[in-house]
Image: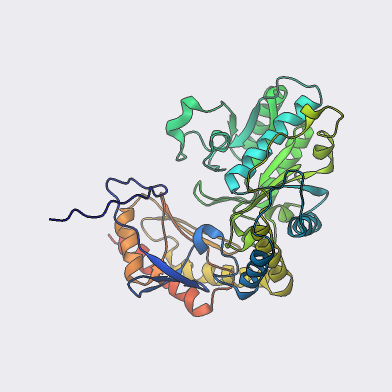
Amino acid sequence: MTPPPKNHLWRPYTQMKTAAPPLAAVRTDGARIVLADGRELVDGIASWWTAAHGYNHPHIRAAVAAQLEAMPHVMFGGLTHAPAEALAARLAALLPGDLDHVFFSDSGSVAVEVALKMALQLWLNRGVAGRTRFLAFRGGYHGDTLGAMSVCDPEEGMHRRFGAALPTQVFCDLPTSPDRVAALDACLAEQAKTLAAVIVEPLVQGAGGMRMHPPAVLATVARLAKAHGLPLIVDEIFTGFGRTGTLFACEQAGIVPDILCLSKALTGGTMALAATVATGAVFASFLSDDPAAALMHGPTFMANPLACAAANASLDLFETEPRLAQAQAIGERLAAGLEPLRGRPGVADIRVLGAIGVVHWETVPNLAAVKSRFLERGVWVRPFGDIVYLTPALTITEPDLDRLIAAVVAVVTEVTRR
């Protein structure tokens, strides 16, 4: 008997011994994923929230194709190129305040690593020692690399097994009540001289459970960080580019962080690219006659021209097509469609913000069985932990969105039936 072919792939977040084989995708279009067996799935999560304009948008494809003809890649050390120059200028113009200095990398986790490194080094460059830790928030998630893991929730997050190997950070609850505001203020007062910065996900703690908080909470975080003389890092990797209903979530709180991280939808889900953007004051801390004061970081594919071309084309679409209005319309449809599940036995909460809809179960169901039920209904939805969520492309059609909502309502109703 011929043995089965060996699988050389090691897949993400997957127990390779017990996991079912993955589905083979062969084509994407709009909000649809086409499988090798001919099935079409309506994608409810836009490939981890990246495909803001839907898949295969012709404007982005044309921009990448044109750049491929001219220059697919060139190192960014000592060289520059027009796609990166244009993208940096456009991001600086779109972001609030004086977030004017853009450092490119190739993934959200690395964007966070760069932000942490900036915050650590700015104190060293100012001649201040002992600022080696960060204040982060319970329920948060900032990525899978070592530094990013250290500022994720240490108890509930997926990285808790690595606790002993990670740098020790300071964790607080988000200031969602007067008691928590006071506790955060006291913690900052006690720890300020050991802290390099505060890091927060604005409005939504994404992969930590899609936990939402109002803009006033974010404004309080910013106010307290400033009061204690600490830089604020805002992680907009999930929330950036319209997902919460504004182009950037921090706009809703009227704040300007010192450092801001972007990725995911930056290129419209086409290429790997991330950006860490700093204010003039942060940037000025690295200007010196001493070469050691420079930011010693440089990803090999930093500012890849293909990725920058895709990102510029994506920004074109945000300028010329009604993405924010589409996000608002999606939110209204999600709120109305998921509302019948509110108060149902087994359902702890229904949450909607911008183009994000969440059903929070009281207990974690058999997730493998739940995923299979979604596939039976022709939708690609991947619940995790105690939530099932929808973050579709902002361009999704009403019939496809309604199909996603109907599938969530049907599956949750089946799972929670008693």
Q: Is residue 245 left or right of residue 342?
A: right
Q: Is residue 364 left or right of residue 282?
A: left
User: Which corner quadrant of the image does residue 25 belong to?
Assistant: bottom left
Up-down relation of residue 94 to residue 112 (above or below): below
User: Is there any visible trace of residue 43 in the rendered image?
Assistant: yes
User: Which corner quadrant of the image does residue 289 belong to?
Assistant: top right
Query: Tag count in the figure?
Result: 0
At 34% from the left and 54% from the top, the residue drawn is: 367
Q: Position of residue 341 (x, y in %)?
A: 42, 64
Q: The C terminus is located in which quarter? A: bottom left
Residue extending furthest left? Answer: 1
Q: Nearer the viewer, residue 325 or 74?
A: 74
Up-down relation of residue 381 to residue 169 (above or below): below
Q: Position of residue 309 (x, y in %)?
A: 68, 63
Up-down relation of residue 176 to residue 57 (above or below): above
Q: Position of residue 364 (x, y in %)?
A: 36, 50
User: Is there any visible trace of residue 177 in the rendered image?
Assistant: no
Q: Nearer the viewer, residue 246 or 289?
A: 289
Q: Position of residue 89 (x, y in %)?
A: 80, 56
User: Which corner quadrant of the image does residue 232 belong to?
Assistant: top right
Q: The N terminus is located in which quarter? A: bottom left
At 61% from the left and 36% from the top, the residue drawn is: 136
